[in-house]
Image (cartoon, rainbow, N blue to C red):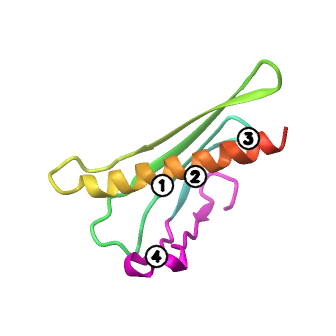
Amino acid sequence: MEPKVGGKMKFSFYKKKSDESRRMDYFPEGTIIEFIPNKKLSYTWEHPNIPDFPRTVVTWELEKTENNRTTLKLSHTGFKVDKGADKGFKEHDEGWTYFLTELAKYCEKRK
C-alpha cells in the first residue's frame, strides 16, 4: 500500500489448502482516495479477476478514545443491490467479520 492520495493498494488472500474444493485466491486492488494519518483511510476496492464485480470503496475511520484506546469504524460501500448480486456483499461481509475479529484478537494480545 502506498499511503498517500492516489497511491495504489493491493491485498492477497489465499484460501486454506484444506479447502481445495472451493479454492479461489483473491487479489483486490485499488487506489487511495482519502488519507488522513491516524484518522481515516479510503480506497477503491476492485477485483480484476472477478467479472462484473462493482467498483466499491472501503473506508477505515479511527477515533482515539479515553484510556489509550481507539474506536474503528469500517465501511465497504458500492455493492449492487439487484437480484443475485448480493453474493459478493455476503462474501465480503463474512470476510471483513473474520479479519476484524482476528484484528481484535491481535490487539488484545498486544496490551
User: What is the quadrant of residue 60 in the picture?
Assistant: top right
Q: CA distance from mark 1 to mark 4?
A: 15 Å
Q: Amino acid at mark 3?
A: Pro
In the image, what residue occupies the spot 40% across and 52% down?
Answer: 56
The residue where tag 3 is placed is 37
The residue where tag 4 is placed is 19
Q: CA distance from mark 3 to mark 1?
A: 25 Å
Q: Position of residue 27 (x, y in %)?
A: 51, 71
Secondary structure type for disc 4: helix
In this view, 12 is above or below 65 = below
Q: Position of residue 50 (x, y in %)?
A: 35, 72
- For discs 3 and 1, the disc positioned in front in the rendered view: 1
Mark 4–mark 3 CB contact (< 8 Å) = no
The residue where tag 2 is placed is 99
Q: CA distance from mark 4 to mark 3?
A: 38 Å
Tag 4: Cα neighbours inside 10 Å, few (<14), some, or many (≥20)?
A: few
User: What is the quadrant of residue 62 in the picture?
Assistant: top right
